[in-house]
Image (cartoon, rainbow, N blue to C red):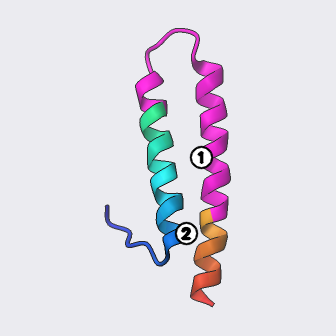
Amino acid sequence: MSYEAGSRECRSLIEAKESLINVIESLRGLEDTDHIQKQLLDLYNDLESMHEKRREQENE
């Protein structure tokens, strides 16, 4: 990974996002998982927002 975590919280958020990406990719091609993939993507976006806020705090 090219991004170096600035804090333990950032590292945890990065790992959680990576895990969600892996799950979403695992579900691709499986029937009747579109709704699950959307929910996982929504969670990913929530984590991304949290991560962005954390990065802004650390850069202040």
Quadrant assignment for the C terminus: bottom right
Quarter residue 53 falls in: bottom right
What residue type is disc 1 on?
Answer: Tyr
Task: Report the number of numbered marks.
Answer: 2
Give the mark nearest the N terminus, 2 or 1.
2
Q: Where is mark 2, residue-wise?
A: 9
Compared across the picture, whether 51 is left or right of 20 comes to right
Quarter residue 13 falls in: bottom right
Pointer 2 with pointer 1, Cβ within 8 A? no
In this rendering, the answer to whether 37 lies above or below 54 is above
**How far from the left and from the top, in percent, is residue 4?**
38, 73
Compared across the picture, whether 57 is left or right of 18 comes to right
Compared across the picture, whether 38 is left or right of 14 comes to right
Q: Where is mark 1, residue-wise?
A: 44
Magenta segment, which residues? 24-50
Quarter residue 40 falls in: top right
Residue at (49%, 76%) from the top-left corner? Answer: 7
